Structure formats: C-alpha cells, structure tokens
Amino acid sequence: MRMPIRSLSLSLLLALGGCSLAPTYQRPQAPVAASWNLPATESGQRVGELDWQGFILDPQLRQLVGIALDNNRSLRQTLLDIEQARALYRIQRADRVPGLNAAASGNRQRLPADLASNGQAGVASTYQVGLALPEYELDLFGRVKSLSDAALQQYLATEEAARAARIALIAEVSQAYLQLDGAQRRLELTQQTLVSREYSFALISRQRAVGTAGALDYQEALGLVEQSRADQESNLRQQQQAFNALVLLLGSADAAKSIGEPRQERSRLVQDIVAGSPSSLIERRPDILAAEHRLQARNADIGAARAAFFPRISLTGSLGTSSAQMSGLFDGGSRSWSFVPTLSLPIFDGGRNSANLSLAEARKDSAVAAYEATVQTAFREVADALAASDTLRREEAARRALADTSEESLKLAKARYEGGIDSHLRYLDAQRTRFINETAFIEVSTQRQIALVDLFRALGGGWPDHQASQPALRQAKP
C-alpha cells in the first residue's frame, strides 16, 4: 500500500502547485461614452493601420524624427527602465524553478576528550563533494507564481510606457518642426512687408519734399515701417527659439546641421485620420494598456498576500560523496545524501498578513481608479483633438479666403491711390489689414497641422515596432 499512497501524495502536490489564490481578473468597465461627442469622419486612414512614417509625408521631418529616436536622452532613460523591469521579472521568475549548485567542502576540527565519542581527544576530518539543492519553496498555493505574475505585468507596463514615450517624442518633434516652419513663414512675410513699406515710405518722403504729401502721411508710413521692423525681430526671436527647441529634442551634437529649410509643400502630414471607436482606443493606446498591466500586477499581489495565510513547504538537500580522507572521496561506499523538508504555518504574526492583504486590496482599488482616470483622460484628449482638427480645418479655409480678399483689396487700394482717387491713409490701412490676415492664416494653418499631430498621438498613433515586439512579450510570459 506504500506506493499508491506516495503516488497519491505526489499527485496532490502537483495539483495544489497549479492553484492560485489571485482573484479572477476582469477589465473594469470604461467610464466613457460609447462614441465621440463630435461626429468623426469615416473617410481617411485609420491610426491602427498607419505608422508614424506613413503619417509624416515630409521626408526631412521623417529624417529628424529618426534622429530623435536614436539620440533623445529622455527616451534613452525610458528604454533603460525597460531593461530594469525585465531583469526584475527574470529574477522573480527564477524562484519558480529549483536551483542546483555544485558544492565542495572540507572540515577539520579538534575535539576534546569529554566531547569525543570514544573518550579520547583527537582531530576529525570531513570532506564532501556533490550537488546541492538550495532552499526551494513548493508553490502549493501560488504565492511564488503570483509574485512572478506581478513582476511580469510590471515589465509589460514598462514596455507600454516606453511605447507612449516614443509616440510622445514623435509628436513633439513633429510639432516643433511645424512651429519652426510657421515661424519661418511669418518671418518671410514680415520681411516682404518691410521691403514694401520701406518702398512706400521712400515714396512718401519724396512727395513730402516736393510738398505733395503731408506730415500725417509721412508719420503713418514711418510708423508702419517701424512696426514691420519690430515684427521682424519678434518673428526672428520665435524662429530661433523654435529652432533651439527642435535641436534639444533631436538630442544630437550635430542636430543643428540636420535641420534645413523646410520645403515649400504644405501637406507635411496625412490630413484625414479616422478616429474609430472609444473601445478601439482602449485596445491601442499605450498609456491605457500600461495602466491595465499595473492593475493586473496589483491583482496578482492579492494572490500572494492570500497565500501567506497558508502553510509554506521548503525543500533543501544534497547528493554527493563524503569521506574522512580527501583521497577517499570517490571510493566505493562514500556516497552521501541529505533531504530536509521544512513546513511553516503562520500562527501569530501580529496581524502582518492581514495588513498585507488589506494593503494589496487597497492598491488594487487604487489601480482601478487610476485605470479609469487614464481612460477618461484619453477620451477627453481625443475629443479635444477631434474638435480642434474639425474647427481649425474650417477656420483655415475661412482665413485663406479672408487673406485672398485682403490681397485683392490691397491691389485695388494701391491702384486707387496711384490714380489719385483715394488717400494714402486708405492705402496704408489696406496694407495693414492684408498683413494681419496673412499672419492669422499662417498661424491657423500651423495650429491645424499641430492639431493633427495631437489627434495622431491621442489615438495611440502607430509605432511600427509594436507588432514586432508582441511575439517576444508572449514568449516572456510563463
């Protein structure tokens, strides 16, 4: 009857070793509406099918983003955090399998006569060589597995955080490039306006010298020249600051040399993006996925805290040869072994285990709240980006029409002034209006392109390495 009892005991241990006391995980219900507040367009490219290289149409901007991904220090620090999380997971996972060490030891000691078994003082020697099993816990109630699962989820959360950092860096470089482009366009407009106003001022000066223009016309023309000079310095400052911000994001000592004059085409990005549904956002956006992995880690911590209330069995042992003489270590009959199982059952711990369980449950509740807050924040960011992109598109068209009208008004005012029909003040007013409307159009068109980048990022805009990294992550799971 001894063999069936042993087999039954082994089967029971194996069955218990597969159990876990962690609660069954269920994704919390997303506390957001089922659709966006604004009607999202269904024509265009979906973010899930569009990586950042497909989203960015400007070749120079693509090159700059690549430089930033290779050299940005903040991103590099985030990637190093991944290595730390991976190492911690591997350390925790190693506790799930028994270790094996090669061991060799020697001991010589002198025993006095009253301690020796034969009543005579002498020197005793013991030499051992073999394999040793360090302390290994039989994971009957899933404590070690829960700790390993928690470490895995923390690692996966760090991976998603790195994806979020990459997407954020792509967006920041794109927006800095667009701001630089807008500053350069405003600077070019100001320089052209200054040349035109200096020409008008020179003409007024000559007319005043011969008495055909008054002091008011002269002062108005002079004021517009000085205004253009001030605007030129302001736009030059903004252009230089935008340039410096872009250099910082690129993170390379030679980054300044990589930034050339933006090309003349205005379609630097894909102009139509399909937002999809909030549920697809939850499946794709990396900060939401990271929050869910952290929630799953806290869920596993509850399993480890529950398992601490149950008995813990640890095994240690060794197998090898022993002899009183080093030369007899490998002689026949020198084989030795030891097997030391240890059972510990918590009886009184001052409430430590109960407190640890309460802490784990509170941390899970906090993680649920953090996950729901992340979903709500993401939903709002997408809704804001959709609203900005939609309204700025219409505003850009209106600003373009207004700027074109101002251009035509300026041509008519110039012709009427040169024909002696209107005064010089009306001509100057037309110049002023045209400059204001052209500047407003440049600013709105820049804001719309930046809003497209915001929408791409808010939707969890594609990162091509994400799909390639999934098999590796699946292999990392136990």
Image (cartoon, helix red, strand yellow):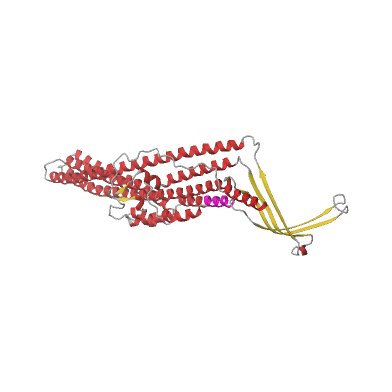
Q: Is residue 237 visible?
A: no
Q: What residue sits 19% from the left and 44% below the top?
A: 406
Q: Residue furthest top?
A: 350
Q: Does 200 appear in magenta?
A: no
In front: 157, or 230? 157
Across and down, in percent, residue 315 comes to 66, 50
In front: 66, or 298? 298
Across and down, in percent, residue 102 comes to 67, 59
Across and down, in percent, residue 239 comes to 34, 48
In front: 81, or 90? 90
Give the extent of the magenta segment.
84-94
What is the chief secondary structure element of the magenta stretch? helix
Residue 35 in the figure: left or right of residue 193: right
Looking at the image, residue 346 lies above or below residue 340: above
Numbered disc total: 0
Residue 58, located in which quarter of the rendered image? bottom left
Q: Is residue 165 visible?
A: yes
Residue 121 in the figure: left or right of residue 249: right
Across and down, in percent, residue 295 comes to 48, 42
Q: What residue sits 13% from the left and 41% below the top?
A: 422
Residue 27, located in which quarter of the rendered image? top left
Q: Does 88 appear in magenta?
A: yes
Residue 419 in the figure: left or right of residue 117: left
